[in-house]
Image (cartoon, helix red, strand yellow):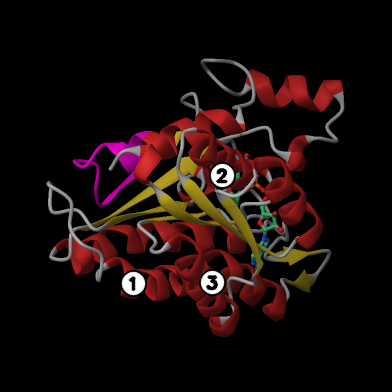
Amino acid sequence: MKIQESIALVTGGASGLGEATVRNIVQNGGKAAILDLSEERGNRLVEELGGNAIFFKTNVTSEEDVQKAIDGTIARFGSINTVVNCAGIGNPEKTVSRGKAHGYESFKNVIEINLIGTFNVIRLAAEKLVENQPDVEGERGVIINTASVAAFDGQIGQAAYSASKGGVVGMTLPIARDLAKSGVRVVTIAPGLIETPLFGTLSDKARTALEAQVPFPSRLGRPSEYAQLAQSIIENVLLNGETIRLDGAIRMAPR
Ligand SMILES: NC(=O)c1ccc[n+]([C@@H]2O[C@H](COP(=O)([O-])OP(=O)(O)OC[C@H]3O[C@@H](n4cnc5c(N)ncnc54)[C@H](O)[C@@H]3O)[C@@H](O)[C@H]2O)c1
């Protein structure tokens, strides 16, 4: 699919990797719906990008919110053919810390947003994607998920986060297989260290230490590099059922 034909739902689209993806799609002639909790940032981005962007205040864990955003996007743009799942949280907590067990609710919360929220959006959007008219390749849509290198090399304090992202990696192939007969692809990106608002407050010392862990290029990644990979996935119909690391060859140490 050409990027200018993309009509995308982008969760977490008001910040960081999702925001960069929204900008790239709209600046290349596509259309994007921003599904995010942050009304202020979402509306500001729509104001900046104009009529080919729309914002829906959405919690990805809510069936009702996601359904409303999907229906609203179709009402505005006519259809949806792309989904980019970027909404996510990290909440570092050790299995036992100072003699106290990891919280049960805090573990569930990370899984609910990062893993179940991602699947909630996939299932409800896929119901619409499979109804699209196929293009010359027989393609009806593409779904891009965001895992993390923590799915493979989770650090101390990342039990919940790694489990959630490992779940996203694990469901990529079966969902691609489920949707293959409908011409809908599913690809996951596993980013390393990308400079988003998450890293905005780093001291120079902490930044240098993080950058030194990346073999090449030895720097934090740019959100635009994530958006560029998302564009390649949208455009390259042979990419399917796979997780792609975007990480400058980093393999995270235990801490
Ligand atoms: N930045 C990195 O280095 C990095 C590395 C690996 C993976 N990731 C993953 O990439 C994704 C995007 O991260 P980012 O760095 O852009 O973070 P970010 O905090 O800049 O953006 C995340 C966005 O998701 C939204 N969000 C959070 N919970 C939500 C919910 N329940 N419903 C709807 N929206 C919700 C937030 O409001 C925010 O706008 C996350 O899934 C994160 O785990 C990021």
Q: Earlier in the sequence, mark 1 or mark 2?
A: 2
Q: Amino acid at mark 2?
A: Val
What stretch of residues is rendered in magenta?
Answer: 232-244
Report crowding for label 2: few under 14, some 14 to 19, many 20 or more residues within 10 A (C-alpha).
many
Please indicate whether residue 47 sits to the left or right of residue 235 in the image: right
Q: Which quarter of the image is occupied by the N terminus? A: top left
**Quadrant for the C terminus in the image:** top right
Task: Using the rendered image of the protein, determine whether residue 193 is visible from the camera's viewpoint.
Answer: yes
Secondary structure at numbered mark 1: helix
Of the numbered discs 3 and 1, the one sitting upstream in the chain is 3
On the image, which quarter does residue 179 sit in? bottom left
Between marks 1 and 2, how big is the CA–CA gap?
20 Å
- Examine the structure image and report whether residue 109 is included in the region drawn in magenta: no
Is the residue at mark 2 in contact range of ligand 1, meaning its CB lies under 8 Å from it? no
On the question of residue 118 being in view, the answer is no
Q: Is residue 74 left or right of residue 96?
A: left
Q: Amino acid at mark 3?
A: Gly
Q: Position of residue 196 (x, y in %)?
A: 70, 38
Q: Secondary structure at mark 3?
A: helix
According to the picture, the residue beneath numbered tag 2 turns out to be 22
Name the residue beneath numbered marker 3.
Answer: 72
Q: Which numbered disc, 3 or 2, marks the residue that appears first in the sequence?
A: 2
Which residue is the site of mark 1?
128
